[in-house]
């Protein structure tokens, strides 16, 4: 590896005994450009997620890292620079102490990682007269003990998401000033020979996530491993993530009095907040590869920009329709029987009837007539503007030439992006939302919308609906989005697993109308929004969280006890719903984007589920309840996580997506905002989990097995994030996955 390309070049100074050039800014905070500040903030957030993931997945292992106290770290660095004079050592100690002895790092430990640099890559100076003899780098970064994994990185900034671009209050200025650095450094001592005089140099270089990952690639992986395309691609993803996160810091999310908003406005406001963090703890979750800056600002939820749908017409005989498939088992070779020319299809069923007013529907019909299209032969469906501009001309050009689909040259119907980017919310308070293909790459997968996923979503929804009848608590407390109305392009010679058709489809996701209107004070609250720190009101002493307004609504003081009470209600409802589904043999997608709490008049006692295409199951338990095998359609030769052979395999998703990601992300935000120790909220989580397990009528041996998995085992499963991306071959398709093990969080309490 060429260190010149990885580490920032250092310029020779007159007296370079201590070189902090790359740590200390060349400008004062007020002189820095707004863009520099925002990029530093974004970079540190990605650094936090990156280091924590590398530690959790054991990419950075114990045999590489040494854990030291702050004083041990200082001693180690100074002792390596023994050639420095006494005065120079004192100066070096002062410089190091300025980095380590801060309030943020009180009681922190430090990981130290010694790295030998290749002999032919020694020069890091632009001065030709200067060479450096046998340099050795030491990477250092601070950590603290944690519950979900042994140690986690201590970031230089803890208030990433609530950045104020135009704040003038003293709080924001002081916070921004503390955000512009990182706590990850490369330290090097070496002898320097110049034309004037020899001297010794102690260099401290602030690292970026990209630099750190390049060092990890070089030091932790074999040459064969590094040849995988995913290794280089991941570095590129880090760069794009930093860039797009920087853009997101210019969001349009001013502080708002949330309960003054209508129910639908509240829901969309929380979707915008959730978009700021996307999938918690994933270092590259924010990037949407394929969006340029203009597109990103137009189609990301945090910018609150309305978009107008584009419309195309598709020949009905090459369209699959969801409602025609309800209750039916479809095999791939039977697809021809389920297109819209079939007697099984609804007569002239149209997506526009859910999405547009009567006048707007007439405009669509007129656009079809102007192009000579018979409405009996063609169906009009909406398309995401980005998809029509960039994707369909590339992937479905032949189909367009054949007349399978026609661009109606019509834009009508206002919608906004949600945190899911390809899911759109209406601006007219309608319960009918949209899910459209958006063929950008995110989390290692293309966000297209294949018919097979839509079919599986119907089957998942059917199982959940049957579960409501099997458990009266579920019947009272669980709401489901209706995802049966969809239309998908399927050419005559097409297959469910072909690439091209999945770029042209639409699903109308209908929410229970009472939850969108908020007739009884209901508010829909995506759990992912609870993992986000909210913008601070002007002159506030700290940044905010949804719990602030919740405590006001409940007439609670802002105390640790109040936060624990509210978080306990979140856990109670979450565990009650999902453990009852688990008892029946089902486990929905448990991450915070698909799990939506129903807040009503200060309390959370109900929940809504959406996106039903990954409802996982344990078939023996399901059959005991009289619920049939849904006959999920799974691509031959590909991994299958929908069917789980044992209850333990099904419980994996509660442990990982439900607790380690969804609920822990909420804990992480609450601890930051309200300055609560992590173990306090983990104890609340554990107690609520036990309470709900006690209330649900599990069989004795099943309960014993659950307790063994959740509480007795020393280790829990871990859903991998970075390694699957590094090992992903070829063009990204479906989301890569993998699993490992990590410490049991409850054993740390």
Image (spheres, grey):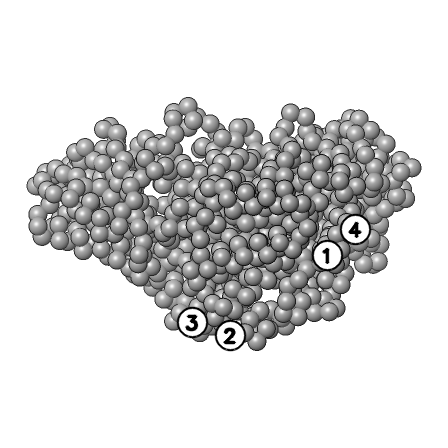
Asked if 669 appears above or below 67 in the picture, the reply is below
Q: Residue at x 51, y 74 (%)?
A: 557
Judged from this view, the residue extending furthest toward the bottom is: 555
User: What is the quadrant of residue 617 in the picture?
Assistant: top right
Q: Secondary structure at mark 1?
A: helix
* Residue 237 placement, left or right of 317: left
Which callout, 1 or 2, points at the residue further toward the start of the chain?
A: 1
Quarter holding the N terminus? Answer: top left
x and y, in percent, of residue 20 in the image:
23, 50
Answer whether labels 1 and 3 touch (C-beta < 8 Å): no
Q: Which mark is residue 541?
A: 3
Task: Classify mark 3: residues with Cα within 10 Å, few (<14), some (14-19) or many (20+).
Answer: few
Q: Which mark is residue 557?
A: 2
* Residue 353 placement, left or right of 200: right
The residue that mark 1 highlights is: 473
Task: Classify mark 1: residues with Cα within 10 Å, few (<14), some (14-19) or many (20+).
Answer: some
Which callout, 1 or 3, points at the residue further toward the start of the chain?
A: 1
**Label 4 vs label 1: CA separation?**
9 Å
* Residue 403 placement, left or right of 146: right
Which callout, 2 or 3, points at the residue further toward the start of the chain?
A: 3
């Amino acid at each position: 590896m060429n260190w010149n390309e990885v580490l920032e070049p250092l310029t020779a100074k007159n007296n370079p005994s201590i070189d902090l050039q790359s740590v200390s800014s060349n400008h004062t905070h007020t002189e820095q450009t707004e863009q520099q500040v925002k990029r530093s903030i974004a970079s540190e957030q990605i650094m936090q997620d990156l280091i924590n993931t590398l530690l959790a997945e054991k990419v950075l292992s114990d045999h590489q890292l040494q854990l030291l106290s702050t004083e041990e770290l200082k001693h180690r660095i100074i002792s390596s620079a023994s050639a420095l004079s006494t005065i120079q050592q004192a100066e070096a100690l002062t410089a190091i102490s300025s980095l380590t002895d801060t309030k943020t790092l009180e009681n922190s430990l430090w990981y130290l990682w010694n790295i030998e640099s290749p002999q032919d890559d020694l020069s890091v100076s632009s001065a030709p007269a200067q060479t450096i003899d046998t340099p050795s780098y030491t990477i250092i970064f601070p950590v603290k003990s944690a519950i979900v994994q042994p140690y986690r990185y201590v970031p230089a900034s803890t208030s990433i998401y609530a950045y104020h671009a135009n704040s003038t209050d003293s709080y924001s200025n002081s916070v921004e000033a503390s955000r512009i650095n990182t706590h990850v450094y490369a330290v090097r001592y070496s002898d320097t020979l110049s034309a004037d005089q020899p001297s010794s140099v102690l260099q401290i270089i602030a690292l970026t996530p990209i630099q750190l990952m390049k060092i990890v690639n070089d030091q932790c992986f074999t040459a064969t491993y590094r040849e995988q395309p995913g290794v280089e691609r991941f570095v590129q993803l880090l760069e794009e993530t930093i860039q797009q996160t920087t853009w997101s810091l210019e969001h349009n999310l001013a502080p708002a009095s949330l309960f003054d908003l209508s129910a639908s406005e509240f829901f969309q406001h929380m979707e915008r907040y959730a978009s700021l963090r996307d999938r918690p703890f994933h270092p590259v979750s924010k990037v949407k590869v394929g969006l340029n800056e203009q597109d990103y600002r137009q189609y990301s939820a945090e910018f609150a920009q309305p978009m107008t749908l584009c419309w195309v017409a598709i020949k009905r005989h090459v369209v699959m329709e969801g409602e025609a498939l309800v209750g039916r088992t479809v095999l791939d070779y039977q697809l021809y029987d389920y297109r819209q020319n079939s007697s099984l299809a609804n007569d002239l069923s149209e997506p526009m009837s859910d999405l547009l007013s009567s006048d707007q529907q007439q405009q669509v019909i007129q656009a079809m007539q102007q192009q000579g299209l018979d409405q009996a032969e063609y169906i009009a469906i909406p398309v995401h503007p980005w998809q029509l501009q960039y994707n369909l001309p590339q992937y479905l050009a032949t189909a367009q030439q054949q007349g399978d689909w026609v661009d109606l040259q019509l834009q009508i119907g206002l919608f906004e992006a949600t945190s899911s980017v390809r899911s759109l919310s209406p601006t007219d308070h309608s319960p009918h939302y949209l899910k459209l293909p958006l063929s950008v790459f995110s989390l290692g997968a293309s966000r297209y919308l294949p018919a097979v996923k839509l079919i599986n979503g119907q089957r998942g929804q059917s199982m959940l609906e049957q579960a409501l009848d099997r458990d009266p608590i579920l019947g009272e407390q669980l709401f489901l989005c209706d995802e049966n109305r969809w239309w998908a392009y399927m050419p005559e010679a097409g297959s469910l697993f072909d690439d091209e058709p999945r770029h042209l489809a639409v699903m109308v996701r209908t929410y229970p109308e009472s939850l969108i209107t908020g007739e009884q004070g209901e508010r829909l609250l995506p759990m992912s929004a609870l993992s986000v720190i909210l913008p601070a009101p002007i002159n506030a002493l700290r940044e905010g969280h949804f719990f602030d307004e919740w405590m006001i609504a409940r007439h609670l003081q802002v105390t640790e006890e109040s936060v624990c009470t509210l978080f306990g209600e979140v856990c109670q409802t979450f565990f009650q719903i999902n453990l009852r589904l688990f008892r029946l043999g089902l486990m929905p997608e448990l991450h915070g984007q698909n799990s939506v709490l129903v807040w009503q008049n200060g309390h959370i006692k109900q929940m809504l589920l959406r996106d039903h295409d990954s409802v996982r199951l344990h078939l023996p338990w399901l059959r005991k309840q009289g619920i049939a095998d849904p006959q999920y359609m799974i691509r031959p030769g590909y991994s299958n996580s929908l069917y789980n052979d044992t209850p333990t395999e099904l419980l994996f998703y509660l442990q990982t997506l439900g607790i380690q990601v969804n609920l822990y992300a909420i804990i992480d935000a609450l601890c930051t905002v309200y300055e609560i120790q992590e173990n306090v909220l983990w104890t609340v989580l554990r107690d609520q989990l036990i309470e709900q397990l006690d209330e649900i009528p599990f069989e004795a041996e099943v309960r014993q097995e659950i307790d063994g998995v959740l509480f007795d085992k020393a280790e829990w499963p871990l859903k991998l994030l970075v390694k699957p991306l590094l090992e992903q071959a070829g063009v990204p398709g479906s989301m890569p996955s993998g699993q490992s093990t990590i410490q049991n969080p409850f054993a740390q309490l």
